[in-house]
């Protein structure tokens, strides 16, 4: 039998002995050796080591007998300690690996940029980076996917659940694609911070401000596979981070239907549903696209926008957007 409790410090004989004691709660040294099929000296050594680890108790009597201690009490603390040691070792390895890569890049500039030659390689890299993200993921999402549709990004919900922050800027044309608004709403509901702009200069993802992925060539005559670059820590990466931050400050926040205002006042601010509609309008999504994706009639969308204009005292939609920005509605 392959030892399953080796990580807790038990060798093969100790594990067999402990499992036997769990099923036959009390036995003596001779009986244990016979059941294990090992010499008495080997069984005695296993019992001695298990007693030292707090796995068994010896009962009083003319012939000493042994009974097991509950596994969670006996093994739990040791496993916790070893798990902490493993985490510490993993962090040390990650730090050493990063130092190694940094030194290699200093000697070889070609190591700063890694080329991904295919769609499958790009998709795999995007997934691996999100799985390994620890703090923050920054995204430029343009219309027309290259590696995978946004709806296939199963790594983001898992990363959000473990506390990774996502800041995503969506291109307006992408928000107008069928099914995108519910997908964005789902991500925002999980914790994603979403904003929108008319157009984005590139599509890219930046993870933990240490590595970025950016498609370089999407469509070339006679070539169907995209080419992408993986950019490691460098001045180029710093420039990409600055590019994202400059667009983030100018992008329009996407508000969810049902979002509450800070003061909870419904008399001076729109409802959550109307804030969602307003955020899409300011992002440049057309009335028709809003109506289609929200399952509303065009007339209903326009009526609600008219109500927002009346609430803001605006004569035009431009005035409505200006008032929303001034009042901090979005």
Image: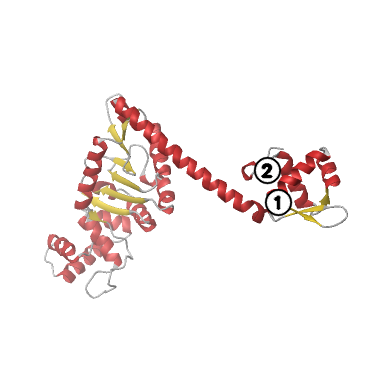
Q: Residue 201: which quarter of the image?
A: top left
Q: Residue at x 42, y 42 (%)?
A: 132
What is the distance, in whole Å, between disc 1 and disc 2 at their CAs?
A: 10 Å
| Residue positioned 69% across, 37% down in the render | 2
For the point 28% across and 69% down, the residue is 262
Could you tell me which secondary element the residue under label 1 belongs to?
loop
Query: Can residue 174 be seen?
Result: yes
Left or right: 67, with 109 as reference point: right
The residue lying toward the viewer, choosing from 161 and 18, is 18
Where is residue 163 shown, x and y percent of the image? Answer: 40, 53
Given the current orientation, which residue lies at the most extreme bottom position?
A: 267
When asked about the image quadrant of residue 286, the answer is bottom left
Residue 94, compared with residue 294, is above or below; it is above
Q: Position of residue 261 (x, y in %)?
A: 28, 68
Q: Quadrant of the C terminus?
A: bottom left
N-terminal of the pair, mark 1 or mark 2, is 2
**Residue linked to disc 1:** 55
* Residue marked by disc 2: 10
Q: Which mark is residue 203?
A: none
Given contact means CB atoms under 8 Å apart, are the residues at marks 1 and 2 in contact? Answer: yes
Q: Nearer the viewer, residue 99 or 184?
A: 99
């Amino acid at each position: 039998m392959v030892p399953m409790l080796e990580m807790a410090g038990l060798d093969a004989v100790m594990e067999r002995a402990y499992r036997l004691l769990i099923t036959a709660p009390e036995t003596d040294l001779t009986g244990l050796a016979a059941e294990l099929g090992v010499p008495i000296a080997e069984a005695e050594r296993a019992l001695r080591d298990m007693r030292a680890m707090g796995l068994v108790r010896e009962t009083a009597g003319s012939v000493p007998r042994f009974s097991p201690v509950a596994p969670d009490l006996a093994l739990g603390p040791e496993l916790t300690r070893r798990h902490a040691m493993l985490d510490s070792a993993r962090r040390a390895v990650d730090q050493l690996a990063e130092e190694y890569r940094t030194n290699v890049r200093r000697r070889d500039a070609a190591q700063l940029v890694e080329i991904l030659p295919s769609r499958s390689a790009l998709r795999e890299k995007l997934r691996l980076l999100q799985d390994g993200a620890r703090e923050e993921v920054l995204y430029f999402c343009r219309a027309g996917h290259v590696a995978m549709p946004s709806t296939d990004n199963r790594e983001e919900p898992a990363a959000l659940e473990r506390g990774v922050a996502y800041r995503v800027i969506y291109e307006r044309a992408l928000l107008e694609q069928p099914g995108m608004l519910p997908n964005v709403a789902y991500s925002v509901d999980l914790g994603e911070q979403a904003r929108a702009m008319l157009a984005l200069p590139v599509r890219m993802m930046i993870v933990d401000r240490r590595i970025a992925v950016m498609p370089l060539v999407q469509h070339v005559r006679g070539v169907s596979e995209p080419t992408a670059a993986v950019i490691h820590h460098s001045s180029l990466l710093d420039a990409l981070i600055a590019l994202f931050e400059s667009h983030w400050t100018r992008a329009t926040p996407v508000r969810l239907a049902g979002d509450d205002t800070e003061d909870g006042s419904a008399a001076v601010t729109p409802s959550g549903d109307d804030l969602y509609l307003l955020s899409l309008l300011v992002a440049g999504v057309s009335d028709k696209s809003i109506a289609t994706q929200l399952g509303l009639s065009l007339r209903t969308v326009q009526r609600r926008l008219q109500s927002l204009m009346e609430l803001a005292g605006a004569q035009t939609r431009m005035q409505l957007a200006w008032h929303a920005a001034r009042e901090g509605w979005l």
